[in-house]
Amino acid sequence: MRQFDYPCPDCRSTSNLHADGCNYSNRDREEFERAYFDILTQLTISPKPKIADEELVHNGNGDGLMNNCRGAWTAVYEDCLIRLKHEYIIVEEENVFRIMGKEERKDAVSEPQHEPMKTLYEKGSVPGAHDNAVFAMVAFYEMVGLSWTETRENVLEWLDETGTWKRGGFAEKSPEELVEKKRHVYDQGYGWREKAEAAKRVIDQKVGSD
């Protein structure tokens, strides 16, 4: 599993260069890092709700995320909390947040729960969407921290179990050859969202018309 690099909570940049239209392009990276650090430090100690019980707060014993952060709970904290959930670092259960275990996280990221990846994962790809879909699957698994071996296995299973490979439309002679041709996507750490959204549009049109 790869380390968490404190990405921008909007565009996921891990440097001072942000994607066009990013809501945080003019903000200092230290803000993200401080927010992530505050949240993760608290959850390392113990699971916590975002907001502690009002009576406990009144008595000075509030143990919620918002009560214990070093600064005011701002929109940056809120967005970093959402990003941590979307990248399967933490999980929320009955309004309580906790850090996911290593094996638990690997199992969770194997089945994307958020759109547009959810559609790709569940429906598979169709001719006209293959390049974007396979690109997005590889990029997604890299983003959430799977090794190349784990990524390769997951994408091969996806090609088989969704019937994507059987639908045809590939220039490659085997699923293995197809996935290996996308190794550069993994190695370069390309983003997945744009490709996934493009693939989802085609999949929705064609699967919906079948």
Image: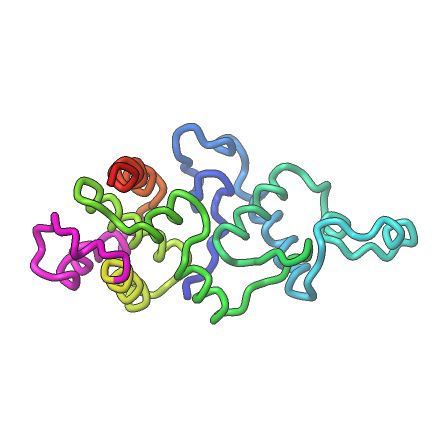
In the shown orientation, is residue 8 left or right of residue 121? Answer: right
Q: In percent of the image, x 13 and y 51: which residue is there?
A: 168
Dividing the picture into quadrants, the one containing residue 60 is bottom right
Point out the stretch of residues depicted in magenta. Answer: 161-189
- The N terminus sits in image quarter: bottom left
Compared with 97, 11 (above or below) is: above
In the shown orientation, is residue 52 left or right of residue 199? Answer: right
Q: Residue furthest top?
A: 21
Q: In percent of the image, x 21 and y 45: which residue is there?
A: 126
* Residue 107 on image: x %, y %: 44, 66
Q: Is residue 122 magenta?
A: no
* Residue 105 on image: x %, y %: 48, 64
Q: Residue furthest right?
A: 59
Q: How is the image coloured?
A: rainbow
Compared with 154, 192 (above or below) is: above
Compared with 141, 10 (above or below) is: above
Q: Is residue 176 magenta?
A: yes
Task: Pick the residue in front: 192 or 42.
Answer: 192
